[in-house]
Amino acid sequence: MWVATVLPKPVPPVLSVLTSSRNPKQSSFHFRFSYRPLNLKVSATKQQQQLPEPKADKKNPSSSDLGWLPAFPHVLIASMSNFLFGYHIGVMNGPIVSVAKELGFEGNSTLEGLVVSIFIAGAFLGSVASGSLVDKLGCRRTFQLDTIPLILGALISAQAHSLDEILWGRFLVGLGIGVNTVLVPIYISEVAPTKYRGSLGTLCQIGTCLGIIASLFLDIPSETDPHWWRTVLYIASAPGFILALGMQFAVESPRWLCKVGRLDDAKTVIRNIWGSSEVETAIQDFQSVIKNNGVNVGSGWLELLEEPHSRVAFIGGALFVLQQFAGINGVLYFSSLTFKDVGITSSSLASLFVGLANFAGALCAVYLMDKEGRQKLLIGSYLGMAVSMFLIACAIGFPVDEELSHNLSILGTLMYIFTFAIGAGPVTGLIIPELSSAKMRGKIMGFSFSVHWVCNFLVGLLFLDLVEIFGVAPVYTGFGSVSLLAAIYAKYFLVETKGRSLEEIEMSLNPDFSVRDKGP
């Protein structure tokens, strides 16, 4: 669910997903909005009551319900980007010592942290650029173009014989990752059938988790082979080739095709992945939205300051601020120390437990996302994270029995990661493109993820210093408090998007849609 700065004590990066890697500090970001939360909540709720009941709610899904299947291969190919993301997050964990020794900066924790996390600088820039790329090129071509820095970055890193070379390689990888983190949720939200959009969107989380686990397994030989890091970085280029080739056979977003005037192509895509019965209604909705937006393609960054885009951009930025300051980076940083306290000294084994908890949570999210809805999952996830944080804080701050304290810390850590993976991880990246307008979806996502990278960096910058000043228990209590605040925010400032098409959501949130245009 990731700015080139020096990092004396790196902390792991996390997007909408979990990692066990180490990550850097991050810089501040400021943006001013004219935000009216009550208007958003009320207007959306009123319109939502007027919308027809989603078809998914009128019948009980059965095992023969395979409406998700036509879109699944296309979503699966897109999720390869998340596998790459997870792989690159974890790939430098084990071999960083060997890399530092071979390239001549062994013992310099600042440079080691920089090598692990410089891709955050690239990721920030990639996120900013992604919106314009998607508007101009569409999702498929942007995916394919984005594999260039991913493949080149992996190969340059694998062949590096100096610090500068590996830094450039990692930067290029980060550039590709930044574009992908924005692009994948947009593509899945626009290609997936409405009824299954949430479940298919959760494949982002699963892909990242599998990438992390794969990198951990491949890193095992690095403990005995000092040159193994080159092999795992060469391997990192393979998924990029698979993604570029797979996208040649994947469908383009029918919404983007309609925006650029390729109406027949849009109808063909809808017929193939949503069914023939959806073609006319979907095209009418697409054209209604395009007509209301006043332009066919493209948008400017300054339009983020206009209503209703500024409200959605504010929500997207706020969700990522809350997600990051709820402490996922800090929990992962201390997870290995927590496992050591109970006798699990292998960092790889500790990371495996973390990965399994993440994977289990993501699987639950697949089932629950379209059943319970985004808002409920987000509230429940943050409440679970808050309870986990308070449990760990009590176990550390008020130890009655040392063994019991360690066991409670393990339980709290795994419960925190599991509950994060159910809601706070996948929902945050999914609900932002759902709330965004067709015209500004790329820009809003780019802005939101840029805020994410900045907050990720800030948490990495401040976390260890705060622990040294206040101790682990007070800091974890602060994380739990932010989690409670996030649950309250989700309760009162978000609307449910389950079972509603992107066009229905946009019409309900945009006051300019006084009448729904059904014309061609």
Image (cartoon, rainbow, N blue to C red):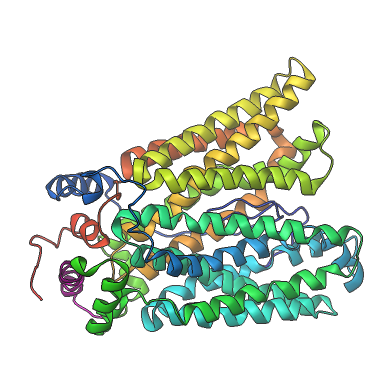
Residue situated furthest front in the rendering: 64
- Residue located 62% across and 65% down the image: 120
284 in the magenta segment: yes
**Up/down of 233 relative to 427, above or below:** below
Quadrant for the C terminus in the image: bottom left
Q: Nearer the viewer, residue 477 or 503?
A: 503
Question: x and y percent of residue 422 in the render?
Answer: 49, 43
User: Height in image: 52 above or below 514?
Assistant: above
- Closest to the observer, 472 or 133: 133
Number of on-image labels: 0
Q: Is residue 454 above or below residue 242?
A: above
476 to the left or right of 316: right
Residue occupying image coordinates x 39% and y 46%:
369
Residue at image location 77% in from the left, 80% down from the top: 165
> Residue at position x 70%, y 19% from top?
398
Is 348 left or right of 52, judged from the image as shown? Answer: right
In reply to whether residue 300 is colored magenta, the answer given is no
Residue 204: x percent and y percent? 50, 59
Quadrant in the picture for residue 293: bottom left
Residue 87 can be seen, yes or no: yes
Q: Does 452 sit left or right of 133 as displayed? A: right
The x, y position of residue 397, in whole percent, is: 70, 23
Instruction: Work out whether residue 464 can be spotted.
Output: no
From which residue to which does the magenta span run? 279-296
Magenta-colored segment: predominant secondary structure = helix
Provide residue 443's location: percent of width, then percent of height: 39, 69
Q: Quadrant of residue 158?
A: bottom right
> Relative to the observer, which residue lies in front, 317 or 134?
134
